[in-house]
Image (tube, rainbow, N blue to C red):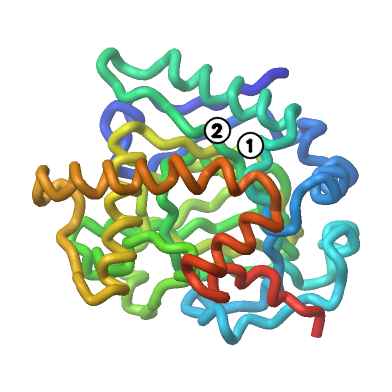
Amino acid sequence: MTCHIDYNVTDFNTNYPTRSFAINHDLATHHLFTLPRLIELSQSMARDRIEYNSGDLEPGHKYEDTPKVDLPIDDTIRQIENCHAWMVIKNVEQDPEYKAFIETCLNQVADRLPAGSEPLQDMQGFIFISSANSTTPFHIDAEENFFIQIHGDKFFHVFENDDRELVSEENMEISPSKFRNMNYNKEFEDRATVYGLREGDGIFVPYMMPHWVRTGSRYSISMAITWKTPTVLRANKIRFVNAMLRKAGFPQSAPSQHAWSDGIKVAAYNSAFAVINPLRKSEWSRKLIRQLFFGRKANYYYNEKQA
């Protein structure tokens, strides 16, 4: 399994892990990203690993107003050139071939990290298949990733958020019942860096960096090759517990503000998920647990009734 991702060493040393920078790769013709292979992948994945809807959206589109696609998943991929759709296949590392690909890519990157860098853990992959002129609305992701463009054109708008004016700490809290789309204002664009991506291009996307994405005049295939460092894993656990406490009426401080309470939250998270994780191995049990603990909204992708 071959994979080559490259970047300017000065860009990496200056910006990683808190600022975006351009990367490049040699994966545009890789067999894992052909439409027939992606159809095969989609047919092997559990339904809760695939999300799709119309791509005719705006950066600030609310999820509840999102138009659906009147096609099954495999036909949506076959007709991606003209069906005005957006799709993500999540956690593709569950397929052994994609898992090996992701590990090859990120182990190569890890070998080049400066001494003392945190290890890359929880390696995952998300593949995006989009029609021309589609939009992924403004959102954040709770991991770091190398986003690589495989086919078509994509314009990636990223925003610094150090002051939390664009996305608040409350909105950075993590819950399965919270849909990812964030409030967006056109004035945000004054703070955007826009990367124009073609086949062979890519971008490093830092943890929780706000962004929205639009495709060009051709259908697009892209992949987010993601990982979490120990610092990110810890912050995510705290933000997950914070979201639950806020829902119960007890808003909390951001991670790293109070070491003692952070430690309690991490311990509580670890204890709870030691019990829950073994129960989440089937799609049916995952769906049930999400509904029991987080409500019906946590299973939003099952509401994509073709209309």
Q: Residues within 10 Å of mark 2 (few under 14, many from 20)?
A: many
- Residue count near mark 1 (Cα–Cα under 10 Å), binned few <14, some 14–19, many ≥20: some
- What is the x, y in percent for residue 200? 63, 37
- The percent position of residue 68, horizontal first and vertical second, equals 73, 79
Please identify the quadrant where the N terminus is shown: top right
Could one spot residue 191 in this view of the protein? no
Q: Which residue is mark 1?
A: 200
Quadrant of res 246: bottom left
Q: Which mark is residue 89?
A: none
Q: Amino acid at mark 2?
A: Asn
Rendered image: mark on residue 24: 2
User: In this rendering, would 291 be left or right of 113?
Assistant: right
Q: Secondary structure at mark 2?
A: strand
Residue ID at (60%, 56%): 154
What's the residue type where badge 1 is placed? Answer: Gly
- For the C terminus, give its image quadrant: bottom right
Relative to 182, residue 233 above or below: above
- SS category of the residue bearing label 1: loop
Mark 1 → mark 2, Cα distance in angstroms? 5 Å
Visible in this render: residue 246? yes
How far from the left and from the top, in percent, is residue 76? 84, 64
Of the pair 89 and 279, the residue shown nearer to us: 279
Residue drawn at x 44%, y 64% as measured from the top left: 139
Tell me: residue 17, above or below residue 97. below
Pick out the residue farthest to the front: 275
Sequence-wise, which precedes: disc 1 or disc 2?
2
Q: Please name the residue shown 51% across and 81% down the image.
A: 62
Residue pictured at 24% horizontal, 64% vertical: 169
Question: 146 above or below 153?
Answer: above
Residues at circles 1 and 2 in contact by the CB criterion of under 8 Å: yes
Q: Closer to the camera, 13 or 240?
A: 240
